[in-house]
Structure formats: structure tokens, C-alpha cells
Image (cartoon, grey):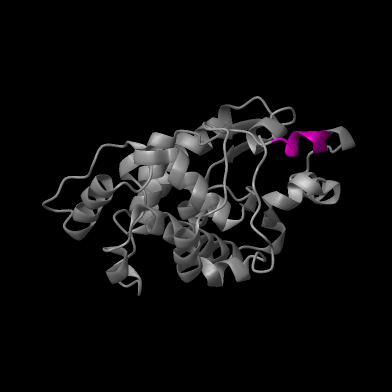
């Protein structure tokens, strides 16, 4: 959605160089690479793309960068960060039903876990998306439980942890460098869309609001509510973060594509 909506005013990407940034983000989160190495790779990808762009604004809509905010903030001191969230019930259901073996399947998760547990003796998997979804750090209180999680539960954990990391990373930056907004509010509020454009120093006109109303980037245009068991497991894993992000009192909805 952000890629389509902002492309008229910016050189806007969606998951730029994802086969590099997704493994890099997970490696950095798990401390398999240090800040210096991460910044070297980001300098060769994102910073280089910005440097050669002919546009006045360059952006990347990518949750893969969520694990690299401190490195990006230091490398690109003029960069701004949008923390765009969506109701976790919709994220978990969407990832589980639409991404299939591309996201936290049992085999790929075991392979990454084995590499993390013993990187000196277990080679890293190739840079395919399916392998590079983070597992809990050894010090994480959820690490033990994660080993017995189902694919759906691993996806719930990911939604919680990625938002926790984003909030923590952005809190270290000055307030003028980050902006929080819910996807659902962008779809229903012209005010929230204008605030987003103002934050990004992009020109806003009322007709731009229409770009946020229709769902985009849908590989399977179907949706349904979580079933009883899914809702129970989601609430157990994600309930605290749902409250933190302002979703605790909101009813789950169905998207009409």
C-alpha cells in the first residue's frame, strides 16, 4: 500500500534487496553479525540506492528493516521511520494462510535454529525468504516454549517481537524521526493520511486518500476471522502487545477485497 500510494511523490520501494536485507536483519537480531558489518552492507544497498536516486525522496516499505533501525538511523542521519502497524489478528491469519511454506514452516525453522545454535558447525541456509524468520534469542524467556510452537504460534510470536523491537529502537531516536500509525486508521481517516504525508515532507491533496482505502499486495484476495483455537493461542502470545498498540478494544474485522 505504501509503495503504491507514495510512488507518485517519492522513489518508493517495497522490500528493496530483500534477499540481502532479510537474512541481514535476522543475523543482526541474533547477534550473528555486528553493527559495523550490518552498516557496511546497508551502505552498499540502501545508502547507495539513495545516493544514485534522481528523486528528492527515497523510501522502502519493508518489515525486514525493523531489525536494523539503529544501524540505518546512524548510517542515514536524515532518515525518518514510519511504524505502520496492523491488527495482529489480521497479520497472523494472513501470514499463516497466504504465505504457506514461505513463513515459519517446520523444516525451515529447524534449519535456522540449528544454524543459530551452532553457527561454527552448521552452515547458514541460502538467502531464501522461507529460512530467514527470526527465532528467539537464547536469553529470551519464550525461547524454550518456541521450540514446541506450531507454525501459527511462531507467526504470532513474530508479530509481537517485531513490534517490540521497533518500539524499543525508535524510542532511542529523536521524536521528529519516527511516526506511529495504524493501517486501519489510514484506511478510514483523511487526517491520519495527511499527518503521514506531513511527517514525510510530501505534498498532500485529498484525492491521495483514495490510495489508502483499497487493499494492495494481496496474493490471495480472501480473508476470514481466526477460528476459536487460533484466537485462543493468539491471545495467549500476543494479548499484551495488542493492548500496547491500541487494539485491545477493537473487534476483529474481515477485509472485503
| The C terminus, quarter of image | top right
Query: Would you say residue 171 sits in the magenta stretch?
Result: no
Q: Position of residue 170 (x, y in %)?
A: 59, 62
Of the pair 40 and 133, the residue shown nearer to us: 133
Residue 213 belongs to the span the image colors magenta: yes
The answer to whether residue 96 is left or right of residue 257 is: left
- Above or below, 56 against 183 in this view is above
User: Is the residue 237 above or below the residue 4 in the image?
Assistant: below
Q: Is 185 on the left-hand or right-hand side of 247? A: right
Q: Position of residue 159 (x, y in %)?
A: 49, 57
178 and 151: which is toward the camera: 151
Residue 166 in view here: yes
| Residue 9 in picture, x, y percent from top left | 74, 30
Outermost residue to the bottom: 141
Question: Is residue 72 something that shows in the picture?
Answer: no
Along the line of sight, the residue nearer the viewer: 232 or 56: 232
Task: Locate residue 161, reporting x and y percent.
Answer: 46, 62
Residue range highlighted in magenta = 208-214
Q: Which residue is at a point 62% across and 47% down the rendered structure image?
A: 79
Which image quarter holds the N terminus? top right
Amino acid at each position: 500500500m505504501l509503495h503504491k500510494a507514495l510512488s507518485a511523490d517519492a522513489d518508493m520501494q517495497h522490500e528493496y534487496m530483500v534477499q540481502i536485507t532479510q537474512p541481514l536483519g535476522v543475523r543482526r537480531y541474533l547477534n550473528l553479525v555486528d553493527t559495523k558489518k550490518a552498516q557496511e552492507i546497508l551502505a552498499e544497498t540502501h545508502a547507495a540506492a539513495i545516493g544514485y536516486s534522481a528523486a528528492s525522496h527515497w523510501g522502502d516499505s519493508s518489515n525486514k528493516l525493523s531489525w536494523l533501525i539503529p544501524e540505518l538511523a546512524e548510517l542515514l542521519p536524515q532518515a525518518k521511520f514510519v511504524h505502520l502497524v496492523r491488527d495482529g489478528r489480521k497479520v497472523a491469519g494472513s501470514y499463516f494462510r497466504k504465505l504457506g511454506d514461505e513463513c515459519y514452516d517446520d523444516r525451515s525453522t529447524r534449519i535456522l535454529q540449528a544454524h543459530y545454535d551452532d553457527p561454527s558447525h552448521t552452515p547458514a541456509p541460502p538467502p531464501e525468504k522461507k529460512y530467514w524468520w527470526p527465532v528467539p534469542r537464547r536469553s529470551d524467556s519464550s525461547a524454550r516454549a518456541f521450540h514446541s510452537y506450531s507454525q501459527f504460534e511462531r507467526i504470532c510470536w513474530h508479530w509481537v517481537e517485531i513490534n517490540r523491537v521497533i518500539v524499543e529502537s525508535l524510542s532511542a531516536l529523536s521524536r521528529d524521526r519516527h511516526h506511529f500509525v495504524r493501517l486501519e486508521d489510514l484506511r478510514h481517516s483523511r487526517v491520519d493520511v495527511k499527518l503521514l504525508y506531513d511527517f514525510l515532507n510530501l505534498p498532500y491533496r485529498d484525492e491521495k486518500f483514495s490510495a489508502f482505502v483499497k487493499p494492495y499486495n494481496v496474493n490471495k484476495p480472501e480473508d476470514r476471522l481466526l477460528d476459536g483455537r487460533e484466537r485462543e493461542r493468539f491471545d495467549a502470545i500476543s494479548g499484551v502487545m495488542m493492548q500496547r498498540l491500541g487494539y485491545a478494544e477493537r473487534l476483529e474485522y474481515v477485509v472485503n477485497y
